[in-house]
Amino acid sequence: MEFSTREDIEAPNDRVFAAVSDFNAIERQVMRRGVEVRRIDDMTAPGPGMAWHARFRFRGKSREAEVTMTEYDPPQAMVFQTISGGLETRTELEFVALSRSRTRITMSVHLQPKTLSARLLVQSMKLARGNINKRFRVRMADYAKDLEARLKAGG
């Protein structure tokens, strides 16, 4: 099962990529939403092999996930592999400069169930696909607006 969306941001590609790859800031944002997150690698610079362990609540249960960056190609792309229980997720972020001051971010998430319970989860998501797709697009649009506002403010 796959979800994808794209958003255009009024900012140069290199600045957008730098903001999206500010992993310390992203970790803080995620923690404010109630997710426990910690780095589990010892890398000093961003790149493939960066990894995080996350603990969060989903559908009333405590869940854990391992997130690993598998590709890092500034300022064009980042790819993450996530394993949570029997569900593997591949998240791809692509950055395309539309002009000197405009960037398109394309995000795609591919879910691959590996266990029966993960298959049931994905099957229930397929039944609610329209609603999930809408929420996914709205969240990405909100993130893009916030990012654009931060970059315009010089942050």
Image: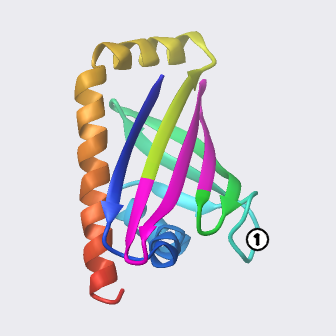
- Specify whether residue 33 is in view: no
Q: Amino acid at mark 1?
A: Met
Residue 127 percent coordinates (x, y): 31, 13
Going by the image, does 45 lie left or right of 83?
A: right
| Residue 80 position in % (x across, y down) | 61, 48
Q: Is residue 133 above or below residue 102?
A: above
Residue located at (49% from left, 37% from top): 109
The residue that appears at 37% across and 35% down in the rendered structure is 58
**Residue at the disc numbered 1:** 43
Asked if residue 91 is among those painted magenta in the image, a careful observer would answer yes
Of residues 151 and 51, the one nearer the viewer is 151
Q: Which residues are magenta?
A: 78-105
Residue 60 image-quadrant placement: top left
Residue drawn at (25%, 76%) of the image: 149
Q: Going by the picture, which residue comes out furthest to the bottom?
A: 154
The quadrant the C terminus occupies is bottom left
x and y percentages locating residue 56 in the rendered image: 43, 45
